[in-house]
Each structure stands twice: as C-alpha cells, then as structure tokens.
Image (cartoon, grey):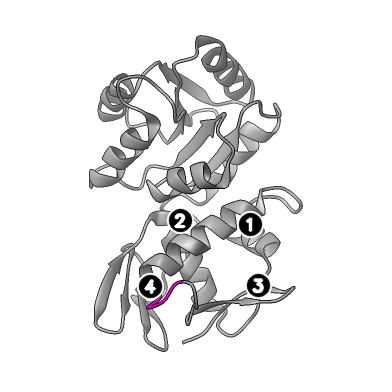
C-alpha cells in the first residue's frame, strides 16, 4: 500500500492537512488539491489510485468533479470517497447518484478513513469481481461481467461501478435474502460490523430507479422483511 497514490480534495486547509496526515501515517502517498479544477488537472497528470473528495467547494463542487470523472472513459472507474459535513440521506444520495462509491461524514474517526480507502481499493477494477462468464443472466436481467451495463429485457441500462458490483453480487445469489451487513462485507469489503447500512439503501434505491419498471413496487430487487434484499428474475 505504500506506493498507493491518493488525491485529497477540500477547500478547508485544516481538514486537508488532517486527511493528508492520517492517510500518510497509514502508508499512502497523498497529493492535495484545494478546489475542483485543480483536482481535475492533477487527476489528468498524475492518475491517482483513489480520490477523497469534499462536496461543498467554491467554483466547482465535488458533485461536478465526480460527474466529470465518470464522463471521462480514461478515468471513469476511479474510486471516489466523498468526505463531507453533509450527512442527510438526501445529500448522501446525491453524492452517490453523481457516481461516488462511498461517503464519510466529518468529523471522522482517525482509523475509519484509511479503512474506507483500503476497502474501496480492494474493490477497484481488477480486484474481486468474478468475471468468469461474459454475462450473468437471471430472468430478464442480463448483466455484462466487465462493462458497467445491464439489459433489462430489450432495454440497455448503464450503471456506475458500484451499482454494477452490487447487482452482480445479487445476481450471483438469486432468490436469497441478503442482509445489508452482509453486502457491506462482501461487496464493499468492509470488516464485520463496520460500514453504514445507509450506503446499501441508497445504492439499492438508485439501482431500482434504473432497472425497475415501478421503483416504488420493485419487481427485481425486493425487500424481505427482517432479512434484507432478494433478487428475483
């Protein structure tokens, strides 16, 4: 991990110093940027392995930075951890919907930031996703194993990297209720008892919005009371 390069972006110099100190102590190489435009320029030149990104910044906020990263095919799969003082579910959903992989609210525990970073790096492209077959098929869902896309009947739907990995996991375990805590361990690679279930809820909601004919009455990803989420064809 010593050579792993992290870009930290925040307009608050105190927060930026803290993030850099914590991550460097954990063995990462850290570059910092104080605004969105500087961050995009550094990403283009240095190609970091992961970005820790604040949401609220002047000129170009973190959401726009994230959208631009996801729109660039050369860096679209770059892991993004939103670090923000905003903790309401709607704000978290907005960040994840923009293409963020995970979030951590300020103030954060010193041990939690590097743990989240390591978990994201383990899930990065070339990591744990099973790609033995070109497609995974369950009922009307046909998921490409490498490209972040799924066919729902005749309709092609583009997914974020996290949505792709989450749906892939659910499709590997059809008709099995899976608890949010289990998804945090197996998809997000968090140690047992860590990670926030809201992360799962928001990504499930975003997946439903993309693949379900009626997201409020889901057909493919169903809630099983007291047991978690279950994928059906």
Residue 94, given in percent of the width and then of the height, sits at 44, 45
**Tag nearer the camera, 4 or 1:** 4
Residue 185, given in percent of the width and then of the height, sits at 66, 57
**Mark 3 lies on residue:** 178
Q: Main secondary structure of the magenta part?
A: loop
Mark closest to the chain's N terminus, 3 or 4: 3
Residue drawn at (35%, 61%), measured in percent from left and top? 159
Query: Marks 4 and 1, Cα distance to the nearest angstrom?
Result: 21 Å
Q: Is residue 188 visible?
A: no
Residue drawn at (72%, 74%), measured in percent from left and top? 227
Determine which quarter of the picture holds residue 114.
top right
**Mark 1 lies on residue:** 184
When the figure is inspected, residue 184 is found, relative to residue 144, above or below; the finding is: above
**Tag nearer the camera, 3 or 4:** 4
Name the secondary structure under disc 2.
Answer: helix
Labels 3 and 4 touching (C-beta < 8 A): no
Query: Marks 1 and 2, Cα distance to the nearest angstrom?
Result: 12 Å
When the figure is inspected, residue 196 is found, relative to residue 141, above or below; the finding is: above
Name the secondary structure under disc 4.
Answer: helix
Determine which quarter of the picture holds residue 43.
top left
Q: Residues within 10 Å of mark 3 (few under 14, many from 20)?
A: some
> Residue 53 colored magenta?
no
**Mark 4 lies on residue:** 211
Residue 40, given in percent of the width and then of the height, sits at 29, 27
Residue drawn at (56%, 11%), measured in percent from left and top? 14
Mark closest to the chain's N terminus, 2 or 4: 2
Label drawn at residue 162: 2
Q: Is residue 29 left or right of residue 140?
A: right
Mark closest to the chain's N terminus, 3 or 2: 2
**Tag nearer the camera, 2 or 4:** 4
Mark closest to the chain's N terminus, 1 or 3: 3
Residue span colored magenta: 211-215
């Amino acid at each position: 991990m010593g050579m792993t390069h992290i870009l930290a972006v925040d307009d608050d110099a105190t927060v930026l110093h803290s993030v850099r100190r914590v991550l460097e102590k954990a063995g990462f190489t850290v570059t910092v940027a104080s605004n969105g435009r500087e961050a995009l320029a550094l990403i283009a030149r240095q190609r970091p392995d992961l970005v820790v990104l604040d949401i609220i910044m002047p000129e170009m906020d973190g959401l726009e930075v994230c959208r631009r990263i996801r729109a660039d095919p050369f860096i679209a799969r770059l892991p993004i951890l939103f670090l923000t003082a905003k903790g309401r579910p709607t704000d978290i959903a907005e960040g994840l919907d923009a293409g963020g992989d995970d979030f951590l609210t300020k103030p954060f525990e010193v041990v939690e930031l590097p743990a989240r970073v390591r978990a994201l790096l383990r899930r990065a492209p070339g990591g744990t996703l099973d790609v033995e077959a070109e497609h995974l098929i369950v009922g009307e869902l046909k998921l490409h194993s490498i490209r972040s896309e799924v066919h729902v009947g005749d309709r092609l739907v583009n997914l974020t990297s996290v949505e792709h990995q989450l749906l892939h996991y659910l499709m590997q375990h059809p008709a099995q209720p899976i608890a949010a805590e289990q998804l945090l361990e197996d998809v997000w690679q968090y140690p047992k008892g860590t990670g926030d279930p809201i992360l799962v809820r928001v990504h499930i909601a975003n997946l439903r919005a993309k693949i379900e004919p009626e997201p409020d009455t889901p057909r493919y990803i169903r809630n099983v009371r007291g047991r978690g989420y279950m994928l059906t064809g």
